[in-house]
Structures are given as C-alpha cells and as structure tokens.
Image (cartoon, rainbow, N blue to C red):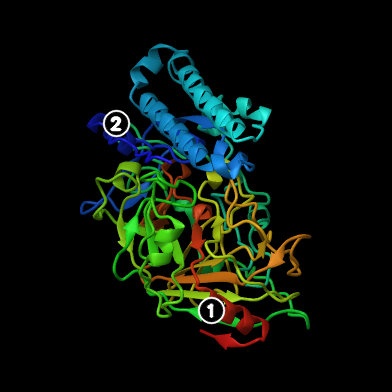
Amino acid sequence: MGRNIRKRRSPLAVRAIAASAALAIGGGGLVWANFYASAHESNNSGQNTTKAAPAQVATIQCPDVGQKLSNVPNQARGQVDGELATLDQQITAAYQRLATTRDAQARDASFVQNSILTPLKQNRSVIIDRIKLEINRVGGKAPGWLDGLSNCTGQPAAGQANGGQNNGGATAAPSASASAGAGANAGAGAGAGASASASAPAAGGGAQAGNGGQAGNGPVAADFVDITKVQPNVARKARTQAAGSSGVFTTSCGVNANKKFNTDNVIVAPGVTNGAHHLHDYVGNQSNDAFATNDTFAAAQTSCANQGDKSSYYWPVVRIQNGTQDFDQNNLGGGKELNVGQIQQVRQAQIKFVGSPTSKVVAMPKFLRIITGDAKTTTNGLANANAHWSCTGFENKVQLTAQYPICPRGSTVVRTFAFQSCWDGVNADSANHRTHVAFADAQGNCANGFKAIPQLTMRLVYGFRAPTLTNGQIKNAYAVDGFPEQLHKATTDHDDFINVFDENLMNKMVTCINNGQRCK
C-alpha cells in the first residue's frame, strides 16, 4: 500500500490538543473536551503535582472498527489498514473541532450534533464504504453490520462507562506466570465489580483537560496504590504434567541502550507514520518502523547477543511526569498527543520462552506477529487487557492491572508480560491481529485446533523513585505512553513481538523446552 502519512497539525490544533485530550487509533475511541471546569497543577519548579477538581467533560464515542473487523481477505488488508488510519484522522479532526468551538456550543445546544457529529458520521460512512468495497473487490464478503459503525455519540463523562476501569481501590491482575492462562480472560477477571470512572475532571479556562498528569489527561491519584497495602493475589502455577514441556530458553537483547524509538506500529498500521500515536522502546531487530517488510526484518541488525535472533520486541515507554519534557515534546506521538514527561530506560529487560504444562511445543512460524494486552481498554473494555504491574520483592505476591504500584524504599517498578501461547497452526497474523493466537486455559490447554508454541514472557525492571501520594495529590507520577483518550491508565499496557528467529535457533529453542532444559 502507499504511504499514508499524517499531516502536521496547525499550531491552533496543536494547542487545542495540548489543552484537552486527543484521539487515537483504528477508527475508534473517545474524544474528550473540557467544559466549564476547574483544576490546578501546583509546583513552583515544574508542574509535577496534580490535583484534579470536579468538572463537566463532554465526550464523543465512536465504535472501534479495527477491533471489530476480524475477517479481512489477505489481499485487502493493506488497503483496509490505510482506511482505518483515515478513520482515525477523521476522529482527531472532530476532536479538534469539539475542543475549539466551546463558545458556539454554549450558545447553541444542537451545535455538537449538527456541526460535529453529523459531519463525522457522514465522513466515516464514506470510509466504511471504501472498506466494504476493498473486501468485496478481492472476492470477500463485507459484513452488513459495518454500516452500523459510522455513528458516533456525544456524552457527558458522568454517563460514559470506562470499560470496567477501577479508579477507586486496588484491582489485581492475574498471575503473570508462564503456565497460567493469564491474558484473554485476565482482564475480565481483574475488572470484576469495578466501577465506571470515565468522569475524569477537566481543566478550567481552557488550560488543561484536568484529568490529571502533566498534560491534563492522566494519570490521576486514584490510578496509584501503595503495593504494601494490597492483599496477595498471585495464583499458583499449573503443575507441569508428564506430557508437558518445562524447559526455558533465554535470549538477551539489551535495554535499548542505543535509544531506538519511534511512534510507528508496523503490525496494526503498516505504512502509516505515527500509527501507534505513542512512543515505543525497541530491542532486538533494529529496522522496525512503519515501512518494514519481512525482507527488511530478515536483513536487519539485531541487538540480541545471539545473532540468530532478529526478532523485534517493543513496548510503550514509561515516563515520569515531573515537569520535564523529553526530546519528543513537539512531536506527534509525543507531546503533541499528550505523551509527556521524562522517558525512563529500563534497567533490565529479561526475555524468556517457556513451555506448556500439558503438551510439547511446536516451532513458531517465522514472522509470526503477536500483540498482548490492549492499548485501548478505555474504549474496548478489559476483554483483552493483560497488564501486570508490580514491584521487586512483591512479584510472586501481588500483580496489578488497573493501578500503578507505589513501591516501598528499596523496591522498584516491574512490568511483566505473558504472551499468548497457542497458535492456529496456519496464520502468522490475522485481520484484527488477535484471532490467530490465543491464551491457554487455566490448566494450560490450547483450544481445539490450536497448537502450543513457546510462550514469550518479558520482565521490565525500572529504577526511578516512587511517586508520593498525599492528600489526594500525586507528585512525580509515572505512566505508560498511550493514546490520549485512554488517559494513561495502567490497564492499557501492552507489548508487541515479531518472530525473526532463524530456523536453527528456533529448532534449538523447541528442543530445549520440550526436553526440560535451560538454554540460551
């Protein structure tokens, strides 16, 4: 497909986005703007203390077309991905309109519907028609329900559910153990009983969105919890059976010391510059960007010690919101899309592949793509959430999904990822980048027709000081980069993997794991 590159916004639009919150990916999300509200940030040296005040917030909610469109013929996927990026751009433009017309909205109660929502629906309908044409053109059959995804609605935040997010008390994540079924159903369990909380306050005077954080769209104090006050919640791992595979294969790929960053995501938005709308850390393959192909990956350099591993491992950066702006403060995906603060480099990035408690594993296909977690849980809910936050010394006791931990002295933040470990045996990717892989069940079994593959597990350890939480104020908060409308919630953490092991090393991994060995 041709390059679908987002245009640079005008200074007015950039100020509007920095003032409130912007929009995101794949043709779906929430658009936030602030109305008649008040909040303040106070710190004489750097705006690193945030206290949110009650406010009214208007939202626009659009169905996430990319998440729902799970069956697209291979020949049409490139064009469809480009059209999904166009839907994203349309929603961003609608947000800008919403954020810069507050006076008109105050004078005319029908302004949002007539001047923003109706044109947005019309524009989305055109693109959805194009998506249907692309699918039908190559012999597929576009689903009729696509037409129902064009409409977007405006809502006050008080009436907007937040996908089960819990901003009030600690919500635990499932165990990040390699053998457990942590993942697809993990978020649902983690969010059980959680209250809706998209009513994050907005800022007054058009200054900030007031949803907390240095850029006004999160995190807020309720997004943090003292881990010493959380009850243990990590489940015991499933026992490996005689037919299982208990080995471990380790690959060492560094900590992105060479600072390879970009805001692309070649899995979900190939050919689209800034397709991720947030900054990624990369280790392993050094040629990953929006325009990389399988040939590009195969010919690339790698940061992995074993040169047979040219796989790409990448994740959104974590930033400390201490008033400091980093190199990308004026860039799309960075400060222009409300990802602000000081980027934190990991101290350790431990990458392991483990087996199945109930069966032997088979080799992954080369160029297999896997995304674990969901960067858009505020829009999509928790069905695909797979975030695991903890602290060193607590990892075997407490894992969190809906809040960031505040670690005690001598302990520091850890992010853990346990990827899907079952493969459909055919496809290296799927239209929504999920259905070709799956999580094993609680006993470690893959569903009928799926095969156990080496399960990728990652452990990222940081070294920054814990934030402080006093009288409802969070100082020096940290947060994972994300799409602006997701409010930098802990549940939005996610990780990406593209398998570029050479055949010999992949076979060595499989033999090692199946024989119960520890190898690298």
Residue 374, position as x, y percentages in the image = 55, 51
**Label for residue 296?**
none
Label 1: how many residues lie within 10 Å, few (<14), some (14-19) or many (20+)? Answer: few
**In the image, 408: left or right of 62?**
left
**Label for residue 13?**
2
Camera-nearest residue between 309 and 487: 309
**In the image, 307: left or right of 330?**
right
Residue 258, position as x, y percentages in the image = 29, 69
Specify the quadrant that holds the N terminus. Answer: top left
Q: Residue at x 77, y 80 (%)?
A: 243
**In the image, 1: left or right of 140?**
left
Q: Is residue 160 above or below residue 406?
A: above
- Is residue 285 among what the camera can see? no
Q: Nearer the viewer, mark 1 or mark 2?
A: 1
Residue type of the residue flagged with mark 2: Ala
- Is residue 92 among what the camera can see? yes
Camera-nearest residue between 288 and 60: 288
Camera-nearest residue between 362 and 20: 362
Measured in 3D between alpha carbons, the distance from the residue under mark 1 to the one under mark 2, in whole angstroms, is 51 Å
**Which SS class for mark 1?**
helix
